[in-house]
Image: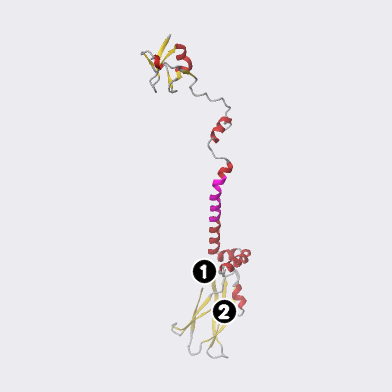
Amino acid sequence: MSTTTQCPACGTRFKATQAQLEAFHGMVRCGHCHAAFNAIENRTSRESSPQLDLPIVLEDLSPPAPEHAEPSPFGWQAATAADEASQHAGRPSGPARQRRLWPWAGALTLLSALLLAQATYLFRVELAAQLPGLKPTLVAACGALRCSVPLPRNADLMSIESSNMETDPAQPGVITLSVTLHNLASYSQAYPNLELTLTDTTDSPVGRRILTPAEYLKEPADEKNGLAGNRESGIRLAIDASGLKAAGYRLFLSY
């Protein structure tokens, strides 16, 4: 027994036997346009045209059943070789990807180096203070860049522990200023400037002077090395205050 089916893609009609319709659940391929269709669902009462009477192609067009695989302890099925091949299909090979990636890797490395160099330049004082072993390298690098690595100058960690001013009987008009500086930091700091203000009996200023480390330190090396961390330094300085009639003083440190 035969029936007529029609290709929905090109309209070509074919004669098909019951065995052909039952094979592969009715799935066939058109011999004219090669489109796959269901011959059972596309049966027609019209007879096929002898001019367009092309053979239908019987082949299994149903999707293949997945192969049985033992579940892994994590609930995933093991990938087959075909799966791995399909996953890697279309991907560029290892060397090809490396050729495309190396310019980006080089640019990223250069950018990272520039950022590191900039950060080192901006924080060179802090780095030299916290990492004394790195200071010679920083000084050498700054020599090439025409910069310097000065000692830290944190006024909040430098204090006047004590001070005293007294006149010198042997030298009229000369006063002697005694100061004890205390470096509260754990690293060496530069000696600060001392702002001395002389006042009269009404606490009004009668004279003011900024004393630099070069003026109140005895040795130039002391200024270069700075005041060591967690250390105190005593300073004693004679000042000519002739004609000022100073009765008191105020003392501040600053950088």
Q: How far across and how far down the image is residue 65, in percent?
A: 52, 23
Using the rendered image of the protein, determine whether residue 76 is visible from the camera's viewpoint: no
Residue 106 is a magenta residue: yes
Q: How far across and how far down the image is residue 96, in percent?
A: 56, 43
User: Which residue is tagged 2?
Assistant: 214
Q: Residues within 10 Å of mark 2 (few under 14, many from 20)?
A: some
- Residue 156 — which label? 1
Residue 30 is a magenta residue: no
Q: CA distance from mark 2 to mark 1?
A: 22 Å
**Residue type highlighted by circle 2:** Ala
User: SS of the residue at dot 1?
Assistant: helix
- For the point 58% across and 81% down, the residue is 236
Q: How far across and how far down the image is residue 84, in percent?
A: 56, 33
Q: Is residue 28 above or below residue 132?
A: above
Task: Name the dominant secondary structure of the magenta segment.
Answer: helix
Which residues fall within the magenta stretch?
Answer: 98-111
Q: Is residue 130 above or below residue 95?
A: below
